[in-house]
Amino acid sequence: MRLNKILVIILAVAFSAALFVGCDTEEQGWHHFEIKYIDTGVNSNSWAFIPAGEFFEGQFKNLNHLKKIDYDYEIMVTDVTNAQYAKYLNEALAAGKIKVDENKVLGFYPGDKYYGYRHERKINPGYYLYYPLEEPGDRIKFDGKIFTVDRGFENHPVVNVTWFGARGYCQFYGWRLPTELEWEKAARGPDFRAYPWGNEISPEYANYNLSNKKLRKILGVNHGITTPVGFFNGKKYGDFQTKDARSPYGLYDMAGNVWQWIADKYPKMSDRFMKGGSWMSYDIYLRIWARNSALPWYHDIDIGFRCARDVKNPEMISEEAKQSPTSGEKLEK
Amino acid sequence: MNFLKERFNYLFTSTKGLVLVAISMVSLVTAIWGTLSGPMVEWGVRDFTVRLLGMKLDPFFREGRIIMLYHSIAMAIIAIEVYFITSIVPMKRNHKVIINATVTVGYLTSMIFGLGFAYFGRNWILHGLFLFGLSLMFFTGILLAAALWPWKKEYYVKSPEYAHTKSGIDLERMAFFTMVVAALGSSLFGAIAGAYFGNGFETFLAENVVRMAYKPPLELAVIGHLHIMLTLIAIAITLVVGRWLDFKGIYHKIAMPLMIAGTIIVTLGVWTVVPFELIAHMIIYVGSVLVMLAALMLVIYGWKKLIRDRLNEQGIEKAGFWRGLKALLHDPIKFGPLWQMVFMNFTVSGVGIFMAIKLDEIFRVWQWREERVTLTGHWHVLASLIATIILMYYADIVGLKGKVRKWFGWTLIIASDIAFAGATVYSLKKLFVHPYYQEPFVNINMLFIDAGLGIVLVILAMLLIWRLVDLFKKHGLWKRELEHPELEVNYTSRNPEA
């Protein structure tokens, strides 16, 4: 009899706890609030020069995975920030390139070839979701005329942006999303490593599930969140000492913080891919070859992007940029 | 010297001793390797384990490590099922001894050297020994299939209560035989692909390629292999539980043909995945339904039997719903395995069917990482459910009685089911809570999962410590088990060694 009573009590406590938490989550209004602005000293408008050449893609180091990108290109040193994306939304709205309809920022996409394969979706030419407004996790608001960013989040990576929205941003400025090969080369450099900074991982290197709890005090929040771009640069914030987590080519946040949409499309499937892992990820997703994917209209609180661009006039690239300590050119030598 | 010899004889020659060794090995591996993931990482336990044991966790080889860990644990579980089968299905003693010896060397070799290779420095000799262990496991399957050959007249069924053909072929024996042959073919199905990927050490986890429109045939073979092997392990334990509870009568006669047909169809369906992926799932669904119907027959029979036996004990001829329910729940150790089979429908089959129906509408809309959590969650739960069923049978074998039996049984059922329910809810969390608000939900969920699994591990540790201490006693339980080494069941046909 006593056993039965104990069992009933255990079940009652468990049920009540679950109910309490369920109700609690509904009550919390976490979106659109202000935090303290943290200056990381990293310029989100800067680009890294990636020289043409061979590199190892993927998880396994053998000749099958030795790939060559036979052109120079540039890639953003950081993820696109909220401030940059809000600026784009304002400019694109003024230029008539996007429209706002029922709390949704929409933009045109010319469509994909449809093969009628299993699980494949028809993506016809038309207007698609770029960025949802009033979605939990958004840091960009729209007052009917202008897009603004929640204070303190200006230099955090933009999240909740769809693949269409990421592509739209890059295209608006004449750039593009990086391909997977471009992304991996930018993250790994000319040698073979698991993470952009080397082969070890600890909370001081990146914003992922293990570090996220430690960062809350510094960020002034009580839940998981992105960090400002370039946060893991060797600086000390409060009592949290970061390590310099730049990739060999000088890119920040190529592991953790937010997943990054990439350009690649595959026939017979509609999913687009992401790289790098996020603040919600286990360390396994931060490995350079790890992937995530979703439909191009999918958005989430840990998905962002960065752009790449061709080097049309190589002479325009300064010698300083080519020879910088983090330049792959120099490392290869 | 005699002290060691007697204990060695018990542990490595008696069915009960062999099962104890295998359960201990799985528990040890679970206890150590369980510290490498989940909240243990956050608490710093992983780093402690890695430093203490000198493990090498190279990020490039994680997938390979995990594949070898899964295989190591799976081999021990298969060995336990083989021990059960050689004890409860009539066969010649020399067959039984050879099979048990081969499977014991097989699983220990693959487990010890497999984990040695994967986690302690990638020495190629260890990898070779791992493969040797797997080969012995395959050879065990051949021996077992031969020993179970259902067309031997000496094993024809005489009792009208057990399912048999007109000529007398034992259909339960046939079900065991079919399962073993299916497992042999399915092992090859995986081994061919494994040899290819293992040769270049370009390993991958099946859940990582699930969304790719084009999967090479060998990737499909790997995906098929892992699904069918777990299914066959589940079929095997269902048959074992049936014999433990003396499954017979009309339900037995309905269940066995269903189980045989289901095993054949689901296996062929999985093999068909490589050449005809599009229709393979339809075949698999048909086979799965038949197997699940057979399991349902066992549950109906078993629950009726538990109620009847208890009421008989109490001298009650007729009972209402509540008294019947009380009788059903009287012995958690015998109620538990059947309940876990029912519970599986909520946490594994139900989730699987829901996913299949809503795949394009819900799960393929989410980011792949979320789908992956659901995929890995549901098969982890199935594997763990099977483990709890084995533990309950083992608790019965060692003769837990009275309050200890009740406490052990109910704690195992409730704690594991809380963990499994928690894991299921966790894997489907996006259905209930927006990712932005998930953290408190996830935290409380993890609490249930960790508490449930923790309690199961604690009571398992208590059971094993008791058995360890017992081994030091001169006339301990081990001595009685050595004198009566076989599992006590009613055989479906005459046992030449009984």
Image: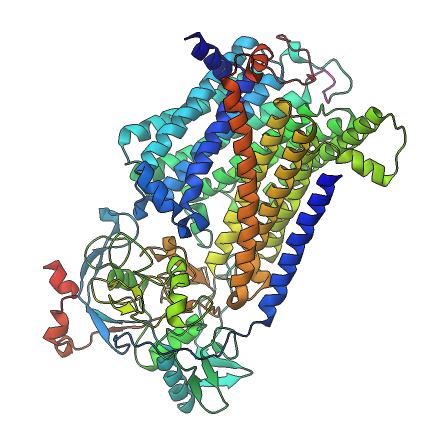
Query: Relative to the observer, which residue lies in front, B17 or B162?
Result: B17
In this picture, residue B44 sits left or right of residue B433: left
Q: Is residue B77 above or below residue A7?
A: above
Whether residue B360 can be seen here: no
Question: Most prominent secondary structure in the magenta stretch?
Answer: loop
Question: Residue B162, image x and y in percent?
Answer: 74, 21
Query: Relative to the observer, which residue lies in front, A133 or B184?
Result: A133
Residue at 44 percent across and 25 percent down: it is B107
Q: Is residue B323 above or below residue A315?
A: above
The quarter of the picture where the C terminus of chain A appears is: bottom left
Residue at 65 percent across and 11 percent down: it is B495
Residue B138 part of the magenta segment? no
In this picture, residue B136 sits left or right of residue A121: left
Q: Is residue A228 above or below residue B443?
A: below
Whether residue A24 can be seen here: yes
Question: Residue A307, image x and y in percent?
Answer: 31, 73
Magenta span covers which residues? B163-169
Q: Quadrant of residue A17?
A: bottom right
In this picture, residue A244 sits left or right of residue B304: left
Residue at 48 percent across and 73 percent down: it is A137
Question: Residue B411, image x and y in percent?
Answer: 63, 38
